[in-house]
Image: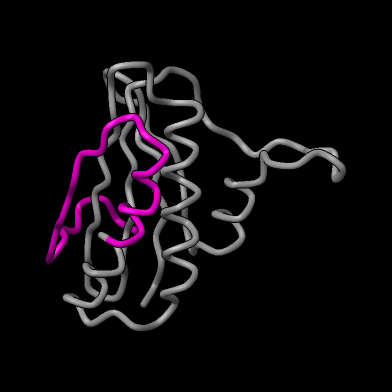
Amino acid sequence: MNVNIQPALVRERFYPRSRQTVRTAREFLGATLDAWEVTGRRDDLLLCVSELATNALLHGVPPGRGYRLRLLRFEGAVRIEVHDSGGGRPRIEDRDVRVEGGRGLLLVAALADRWGVVPCVPGKVVWCEYDT
């Protein structure tokens, strides 16, 4: 998606460093999709917000900090952004099939039409987009 295109609608929330926030992030996305009347690909969007929020909590949010979930509605697309203050650059790695976990970004890459990581100070933004 062309970054020069302005979103028609934006909603965002800040969440503290707590595993319970993954559920509330899903609920926030679900309510936002309802308000925006987006019905297509709902399950994919909900799964990906869970994966991105979980990754932020496990790898990107230092103690005492939180993460920001930003939802953007463009003409024909929805974008999910998770901003955290941790270092590093998330990437998809080959995983041993016998090891549990570590496949969140692989799911995001498989389900989203586009995804990526943008460094910022502090931390990074991990995002994914869905054509609607």
Taking the magenta stretch, the answer to whether it contains residue 13 is: yes
Query: Where residue 51 sits in the image (x, y, percent)?
Result: 50, 49
In this view of the protein, which residue sits in the foreground, 44 or 23? 23
Taking the magenta stretch, the answer to whether it contains residue 16 is: yes
- Left or right, 72 with respect to 101, comes to left
- Left or right, 46 with respect to 92, comes to left
Name the image quarter holding residue 72.
Answer: bottom left
Query: Where residue 102 sits in the image (x, y, percent)?
Result: 67, 39
Above-or-below relation of 71 to 102:
below
Q: Identify the colour scheme used.
A: one colour
Q: Residue at x 39, y 72 (%)?
A: 131
Which residue range is magenta in the image?
Answer: 1-27
Above-or-below relation of 92 to 35:
above
Q: Residue at x 38, y 17 (%)?
A: 62
In this view of the protein, which residue sits in the foreground, 34 or 18? 18
Which residue of the protein is positioned furthest toward the front in this rendering? 20
Name the image quarter holding residue 56.
Answer: top left
Image quarter of the N terminus: bottom left
Q: Residue at x 66, y 45 (%)?
A: 103
Name the image quarter holding residue 7.
Answer: bottom left
Above-or-below relation of 12 to 72:
above
Query: Where residue 44 sits in the image (x, y, percent)?
Result: 49, 68
